[in-house]
Image (cartoon, rainbow, N blue to C red):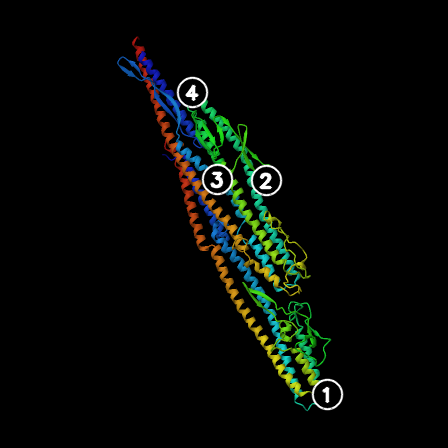
Amino acid sequence: MKATQGTTYRMLGNRLNDITTRLETLRKIGASGKKLNRPSDDPASIRPVLNTRKQLSNVDRYLETMGQSMDKMEATDGHLGHVENVLVRVKELAINAANGAMDDQALQVLSEQIGHMREELLDASNSTVDGKYIFAGYREDTKPFTLNPAYVPGGYDPNNSATWPYVYNGDENPTSLEIAPGERLQVNITGTDLFFGDADNDGVVDPGRVNIFATVTNMMEAVAAGDVARIESEMSVLDQGAEQNRRIRSQLGSRAARVESAMQHQEEVRIDLKQILSRYEDADAIESFNNIIQQENAFQAALNVTAKVSQLSILDFI
Amino acid sequence: MGGLLTALNAGKTSLSTNQKSIEIVGNNIANVNTPGYSRQRAELMQIPALNFGDFFVGQGVTVSNVRRDHDIFITRQLHEKSITLGEELGRSSPMIELERIFNIADENLAAEIDRFFDSWQELTTNPSGLVERDIVIQRGQLMGDAFAEVAQEMENVRQNINNSIVAKVDDLNETINEIARLNERIQLVEISGQSANSSRDQRDLLIEGLSKTLGVQTFVDKQDQLNVHLPGGLPLVIGNYPMSIEADTSGADVVLRLNAAGSVRYLSLSDLGGEIKGMMEVRDVFLADIRDNVDKLALDVTEAINGVHTLGYGLDGVTGRNFFQDLGGVQADAARQMRVAFTDPTWVAAAGNPAAAPGDNENALLLAELETTHFVAGTSDNFDNFFSKIVATVGIEAARNNLAVGGAEDAMVQLQNLRDGFAGVSLEEEMIDLIQYQRGFQSSAKFLSTIDEMMGSLLQLKG
């Protein structure tokens, strides 16, 4: 065995090549800040990385969705608060009328005032967000509540929607949105459920529920007629109606709370996911710069050796 | 006088022998950087002695042969390792390309798939929004384009492999012919008892190259000629008779055929080795597999989306529409044919009820859910995971290839060092030889001048 010129220079060349290649890789890691630049860098982490990225984009979407639902819920809540106020006012007027000692004219005025309240109720029920009716179910482009032309005063029958003072033109479908993987949340309330107590929109008021519009209309008629007994019986129904409004409002509130906590949770998830992603693909800055310096020293050493080798020749000694 | 004249003669042989040796040293030094050159040395032999009275006295020296340092074992090892190196190198460049296509940067096919489903999710919050509907269509189209781009890039890789193979074939035939010529020349030279050193060196080098590209096997026959075979046993060079290899470009993929003494044989993967096998294997096995999987994913996305989309209702209340153009369940080339079937945003079936009310987002919710709940047929992977598996396959193969190329290159360097250690030119050694032969030459000259003086003395005797 002997070390020939070819061997020596081949080894030196290869060594320099190796070091420069490694240095190049390290510099790339240092410059991009990522240790995962190509699939072959770490095939095992590809699936988690792509998965985590998908989840991150999903989380962003969930947050966006929940933000929008919160807006809608807040708007709805505002209207429900208004409905509450209207019902209180109607009750006050009714109490006033039931006190007796009112002449017909005064009763007429009270009745008219209740009529105005009914108009306000109607406005609230037909309110819009972004030009869309919020109480119309899926038929957000249709005005949900309109006067029933076939309504006969006093003819209200909870089991027959044709006799109701107002008709509902929306549908019974509340909107659900996905707020977390696999979790759907109802983000609005249908008008038929809230105002008619008829959640399935089959033209029959559900047991234990109240048609608020009809109640207010009945009250208006009772006050106009000065029928104290009827005023009093309608008043208890009116209380039920107010209770129905409050119950739905509190359901909405608890759903909003759910969304709020879900948003918080998703924010946390987002941080976790970013951490996971970073663990898989980000390079440790200190470590990578250390490595670069280490490799650069090795490179310098190799260059020195190469220079020394070429200085040393038998020809200088003969 | 007779003795002195003989001595003169002996001195002359020494002069010319040392001179010859120095020539050989010079030739070694000249070829210090020649690839494949084996160090040559003069084999010295004394000229048969003559009987003078009672003694045998030598008659000088001569160069009986010029031999090269050569170790058949190392040479064969080099050839064997070249085959491995060639095969891995052949895979290398397509793998680098594939790694680029299936990258893991932020912009890749997986990101497009994510965005497509994200657009459905966005639509659920505003199912009647024409802008959201348009975005769904655009995202669908972009996803289709991304699939088509990946498919097209894979097609380019395939074409590049085909072109590389065709380009290599011309070179191959040149080498094969050259080996046959060298066989002939070596036979002609060596029949007279000399060594055809340079031709043998050259032949070894050519075989090394051929091993790398084609993975050939060799053996020496009874006439001491080197026969070259393909790994599958088909002959390439028999003595001084070369066969030829042709590239058949008539089909979709380039195939090689061997023209052996008038009969033509198509070469399959098992007949080949080295770089060409590496490239063909990537093309026919690995790439084909990846392409199948991408097509499968494309078909599955198309069918899953269409399956749910047809059940929903557009804003116009029409049901049964495909979102993507129906591929009819044909997987082949599905990735390149993924196109959104319509451009009218009202056709997007976000509604789940026949009434198709504008706020109805039920079907959009179902479609958005497919991203996580749908498994690609025959697997338990959703779209993203299925795609990650494809990328991981590429990554694993590329990493393995990197490692194998590195290993084979290291082994080659070791073997080349081993070969150089045995048969290479060491300048130190040559310098020592140079001194040695120079001194030999000087001594012979001194010897001759001494004889000359002696003859002069003799001639003066008469004087």
Label 1, on which residue?
A: A105
Q: Is residue B392 visible?
A: yes
The reply to whether label 3 and label 2 mark residues of one chain is yes
- Residue drawn at 36 percent across, 18 percent down: B12
Label 2, on which residue?
A: B252
Q: Which mark is residue B293?
A: none
The reply to whether label 4 and label 2 mark residues of one chain is yes
Q: Is residue A162 left or right of residue B212?
A: right
The correct choice, above or below, for B307 with respect to B397 in the image is: below
Q: Amino acid at mark 1?
A: Gln
Q: Amino acid at mark 4?
A: Ser
Q: Nearer the viewer, mark 1 or mark 4?
A: 1
Q: Secondary structure at mark 4?
A: loop
Which quarter of the picture shows residue B52? top left
Q: Secondary structure at mark 1?
A: helix
The correct choice, above or below, for B26 with respect to A109 in the image is: above
Tag 1 subunit: A
Q: CA distance from mark 2 to mark 1?
A: 98 Å
Crowd class of label 2 (few under 14; some 14 to 19; many from 20; radius 10 Å): few
Tag 4 subunit: B
Label 4, on which residue?
A: B192
The correct choice, above or below, for A10 with respect to B194 in the image is: below
Q: Secondary structure at mark 2?
A: loop
Q: Nearer the viewer, residue A207 or B157?
A: A207
Q: CA distance from mark 4 to mark 2?
A: 52 Å
Crowd class of label 4 (few under 14; some 14 to 19; many from 20; radius 10 Å): few
Q: CA distance from mark 1 to mark 4?
A: 145 Å
Label 3, on which residue?
A: B87
- Please identify the quadrant where the C terminus of chain A is shown: top left
